[in-house]
Image (cartoon, rainbow, N blue to C red):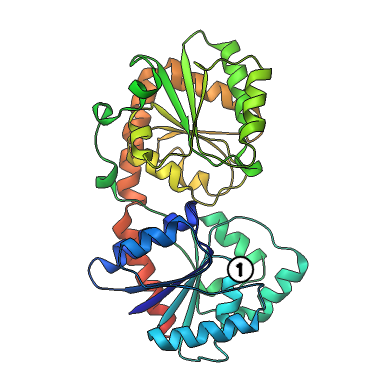
Amino acid sequence: MNVLYLLNFAGKAGTERYVETLVRYLSADGRVKPFFAYNEGGLLVERLEEMGVPTRQLTMSSRFDQKAAKALAKLCKEWDIDVIHCHYLRENYIAMLSKSYNKRVKVVYTNHFVLANDAVTRLSNKLLDGRQDQMIAVCNKGREQLVANGWSGDHIQVIFNAVDPDAWAGDRSESTMRTELGIPEDRFVMLCASRFADDKGHRYLIDSVKRLTEITDRPFTLVLAGDGPLLEETQTQVRELGLTEEQVRFIGFRKDIKNLYKGSDLYINSSRHEALSFLIIEAMAAGLPVVATDMGGNSDIVNDAAGCGLLVEYDNPESMAQAMRVMLEEPHFLAQCRLGAERTIQEKFEINKMAAATYAVYEKALQN
């Protein structure tokens, strides 16, 4: 089966990780021959080209870009594409419009957000729904939101994002992070690797850390990895609150994320918007318990059945700080959550299950 993965911006965020993961695991045994087209290039293009995936730049100026739709239809004929797999509304609309010029191709759309659409978009969703062959929501709340946004629920499948547990196996001895940063082995380290953007909640997270310093005497370090438009603002907030470099450490964008997981004791998610975070499930696969906001699909990951961490109220520093304190001061509970994290990955978020379920969606689309 020839599948064209279509993405507007091929950068380095969770959606790009999703595409790279599917390409790698669906092509490994020959189920899928992958192709990739994009509007704006970035790290993902480099990674896919290194894997030998044919890539092509395709200008997509708006959702209703008929020129792009014609170009996409032509590209699909050139590459003999069976399924176009899209990831944002812009390219999804263009893919559906391309059916007017290439009726053979089928369109699958993965929704990576839990966000309400405006009235105009909801109407256009309803109008184009008949051209949509299959849709994937990466969490249960995502499916609910797709229906609320005007899409027909009968072609929406929930498939959780997933990781390869073997890729994240190992122990603390493999990590060089603490040595690099000068952090003692017995110090409690929390990691947050979200991009510094408004929806990632860093302001609230730093307020929570300040509150944590007031309710515990245990030493800790919050390591913040990543870049983004609000990095300097967050650094200023840390200084203004009097937090030290020992308490909050900025280390910039890093590619050695496994190294960071293995050097940490706890993963923190402070986001306002999440569908199903790759960072959270990667951290769990690496053996980290999680403290996460009760937003979007986080409750599909962190819950009582999973026993892998704690959910907290978004924008409530007291709620976040108290959860951090529990992890910091109760090593037995932390150890239980570590075991729960590893078990939950095997049961719900293992890559071969995701790959098989996604391939089944492709097959279902071809039957339409």
Residue 164 at x, y percent in the picture: 30, 50
Residue 179 at x, y percent in the picture: 33, 21
**Residue located at (58% from left, 83% from top):** 69
Q: Residue furthest right?
A: 119
> Is residue 160 in sight in this rendering?
no
Residue 92 at x, y percent in the picture: 57, 73
Residue type at the position of mark 1:
Leu
Between 60 and 307, which is closer to the camera in this rendering?
Answer: 60
Q: Residue under circle 1?
A: 89
**Which quadrant would the N terminus be assigned to in this image?**
bottom left
Q: Residue furthest top?
A: 217
Label 1 element class: helix
Left or right for 146, reference 51: right
In the figure, residue 334 lies in which quadrant?
Answer: top left
How many numbered circles are shown?
1
Between 299 and 203, which is closer to the camera in this rendering?
Answer: 203
> Is residue 31 in sight in this rendering?
yes
In the figure, residue 59 lies in which quadrant?
Answer: bottom right
**Residue located at (29% from left, 42% from top):** 168
**Residue located at (40% from left, 44% from top):** 281
Between 89 and 348, which is closer to the camera in this rendering?
Answer: 89
Q: Is disc 1 surrounded by few (<14), some (14 to 19) or many (20+) residues within 10 Å?
A: some
Residue 269 at x, y percent in the picture: 52, 37
Relative to 228, does residue 52 appear above or below in the rendering?
below
Left or right for 325, reference 242: left
**Residue located at (34% from left, 69% from top):** 53
Relative to 198, does residue 263 appear above or below in the rendering?
above
